[in-house]
Every structure is written in structure tokens, then in C-alpha cells.
Image: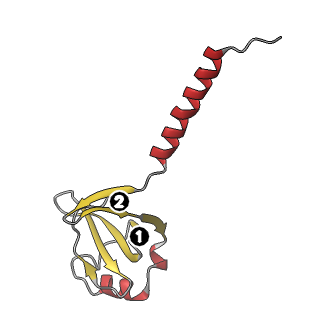
Amino acid sequence: MATINSKGIMKKIMLALIMAGFVTVATAPTQAMSETGVETIFQEKTNIDPENLPERVKEAIQNDAAVSSSPITEAQQVTKDNQVYYVVKFGKDAEGNDVKKKFDATGKEIEDTGDEES
């Protein structure tokens, strides 16, 4: 008759429960506090070629004296809460700060609230 090693089984069960906890934490969506409680934020960023920016965004950049002569160093399409917008980086300004602007698909500049990482 085979003996059951209860310590070995308990270790395996505990390890499985710990791993299940890690998987649950790793796949949980980001949550942020708002005035009305907790809201879930889903955000997806995709690097795109500046040539693939929407025409209206490219026109807005060309008509913006602050950045029209600056080369685009990076462009991203961001989808957040079912809204699509574009983050465009132009390099550094005279003080060495990154120059970045956000636009919606119609070319309207979106005020940067600073709650983004990019």
C-alpha cells in the first residue's frame, strides 16, 4: 500500500494558489480613483510612422508655428476609453524639454493633462 505524502501535496496546493494569485494580479486592468469612485482605464498605444498620421493631424502640425519646422521624432496612436488620439513628439525645445502634442483624429489639439505615460 502506497503512503500519501501530505506535506508534498500541501506544498503543491499552496504553490498553485500563489501562482493563481500572481496571474490574477498581473492581468487586472488599471484602476484610477475618480470623484464618483473607481473607474477602469483601458489604454493601448501603438507607434506609427509619422507619414501615417491622419491628414488633418498633419495639416494641424503644418499650421502650428511652434512645431511646423520641427522634425517629428515619434508618433503614437493611442486608444483610451474607446477614444483615439495621436501623440506626436518633435524633439527638444530651447530649454531641453521634450516637445509633445496630442491631437484627435480631426486635427484638434488636445490639452495634455499630464496623466499619461508615453
Of callouts 1 and 2, which one flags the residue occurring earlier in the amino acid sequence? 1
- The answer to whether the residue labelled 1 contacts the one labelled 2, judged by CB atoms less than 8 Å apart, is yes
The answer to whether residue 58 is left or right of residue 33 is: right
* Closer to the camera in the image, 63 or 118: 118
Q: Quadrant of residue 74?
A: bottom left
Where does residue 48 sit, x and y in percent of width and height?
48, 70
Could you tell me how many numbered marks the image carries? 2
Residue 72 on image: x %, y %: 37, 70
In the rendered image, the residue lying farthest to the front is: 1
Residue 58 position, x and y percent, is 38, 84
Find residue 55 and report its horizontal and vertical position in percent: 42, 88
Q: Provide the secondary structure element on which disc 1 rests.
A: strand
Q: Residue at x 18, y 62 (%)?
A: 94
Give whichever of 68, 116 is nearer the camera: 116
Q: Secondary structure at mark 2?
A: loop
Q: Is residue 21 above or below residue 45?
A: above
Q: Tag 2: residue type?
A: Ser
Q: Please give the name of the residue rendered at 49% of the width and 71% of the height, measured from the top-left corner.
A: 49
User: Which residue is identified by label 2?
Assistant: 118
> What residue lies at 42% left-to-right and 75% top-to-bottom?
82
Residue 68 appears left or right of 80: left
Left or right for 6, reference 38: right
Single out the residue that lies furthest toward the right: 1
> How far is mark 1 from mark 2, CA to CA?
10 Å
The residue lying toward the viewer, choosing from 91 and 111, is: 111
Q: Which mark is residue 78?
A: 1
Residue density around tag 1, few if under 14, some if 14–19, many if 20 or more, within 10 Å? many
- In the image, is residue 93 above or below residue 58? above
**The residue under label 1 is which amino acid type?**
Val
| Quarter the N terminus occupies | top right
